Image (cartoon, coloured by chain):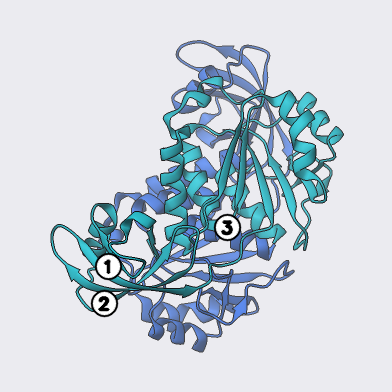
Chain colours: A cyan, B blue
Amino acid sequence: MNLILLFEDDFTDNGKHVRLSGRRHKHVIEICRASVGDKLCVGLCNAKMGTGCITALDDDALEMDVTLTECTPPALPVTLVLALPRPIVLKRMLSLVSGMGVKRIILFHSKRVEKSYWKSPVLKEENIKKQLILGLEQAKDTIFPKVELQPLFKPFIEDVLADIAKNTISLVAHPQSADPCPRYVHSHVTLVIGPEGGFIPYEIEKLINAGFKPVHLGERILKVETAVPALLSRLF
Amino acid sequence: MNLILLFEDDFTDNGKHVRLSGRRHKHVIEICRASVGDKLCVGLCNAKMGTGCITALDDDALEMDVTLTECTPPALPVTLVLALPRPIVLKRMLSLVSGMGVKRIILFHSKRVEKSYWKSPVLKEENIKKQLILGLEQAKDTIFPKVELQPLFKPFIEDVLADIAKNTISLVAHPQSADPCPRYVHSHVTLVIGPEGGFIPYEIEKLINAGFKPVHLGERILKVETAVPALLSRLF
């Protein structure tokens, strides 16, 4: 937690003073080992970042005077379209991409996504939010990514994805493809990433028909947790 | 497991026939759901890759005739010099970098590395090997990375690192630095990555004196598991 993310209901007055208990309070005591007078990096959900000066700290709560004047780091110009991973991987992926500055994430179904994954509690709104917060706190950002669910492959690819990809560089990561992933592009990218085990040929064909270019990262088969930071870092 | 990694003692004759039980046997039955006659991707430790054709498969063991004619994917031209992470992170990092094609990994001590990490069972030779195998199996590679331990910061930086870095691009990842990490370099890189919480100023100074250039990946503070694939992917 390199930034303490604040929400409107943490404020005890009209935007200057906060009172925190629970996870963030515990973190300040146990990890930051902070005391009254210390300054911490804070940020208001979907708003500016700044400094919180500790005015009171005991076993129950932490109080701070906050000043919020700094801008958040720039977002990555990408729409990440990710085949729904296994729940345990999804958890890590949500905080990972939230930390890297992705602001729109679409989770979609494909043949090699187990249907049971769509029933995972990780997909509950409050659990998604929890993971996104971890990423923002790690990276020092306050702007929440939007996460959308697309549990039907064909209607998503045929009716929704083309609009999303309009006027963007449209890429699908596909280890068997002929072309390497481009480097350091200066446009918005729509980046599709398949499931463990990859896309089936029908799905790649549908994506190509929708205007997506298959690209690879070399001969090695990477886990999705490795492939996503590798792709984003290479593209931007 | 996209490749079944074989060792000399798996062979029942002079290099054509193997018999496997345990983890790899279980994987072939439960995950690959393979049967006699099926062909699997195999590779011999520190040697070539190829195909294994299943000749027998029962509850006890798997037998294959193997042909090993394919070369391994190219290694990354990098020496990764990593401040020893927390044991749970180290486990993931070893398989991650093994999978990405790093062939020399040096784990070193720095101020913000807890001394207890050096006593972790993850650092036992057989446990390091286990993690490296997972990475090779994922990425389809057979060449084991070398992992070296440097538990003393000063003698390592002063007496050892300069020789390692000789004739390479010497970089240290440091979020507060002025220069962005270079892209797509075509030389061997010695890449130093600090601990959670970063280097202390004295350490950065020592690294600069040893010829290392501090570089950053943008304003965001990334976890080491994200920073490493992001840095490697940007460099190569």
The residue indicated by pointer 1 is: A32
Q: Please identify, in this view, whether the residue under mark 2 or under mark 1 is nearer the observer.
A: 2
Secondary structure category for the residue under label 3? loop
Please check whether the numbered discs 3 and 1 fall on a single chain: yes
Residue type (three-letter) at the residue carrying disc 2:
Asp
- State which quadrant residue B69 falls in: top right
The residue indicated by pointer 2 is: A38
**Residue A131 disc label:** none
Residue type (three-letter) at the residue carrying disc 1:
Cys
Residue A70 visible within the image: yes
Subunit of label 3: A
Secondary structure category for the residue under label 1? loop
Residue type (three-letter) at the residue carrying disc 3:
Gly
Front position in the image: B181 or A145: A145
The residue indicated by pointer 3 is: A101
* Badge 2: residue crowd in 10 Å (few <14, some 14–19, many ≥20): some
Residue B190 place in picture, x, y as percent: 58, 71
The image shows residue A98, relative to residue A63, as above or below, that is: above
Residue B76 place in picture, x, y as percent: 65, 59
* Quarter of the picture holding the N terminus of chain B: top right
Front position in the image: B187 or B222: B222
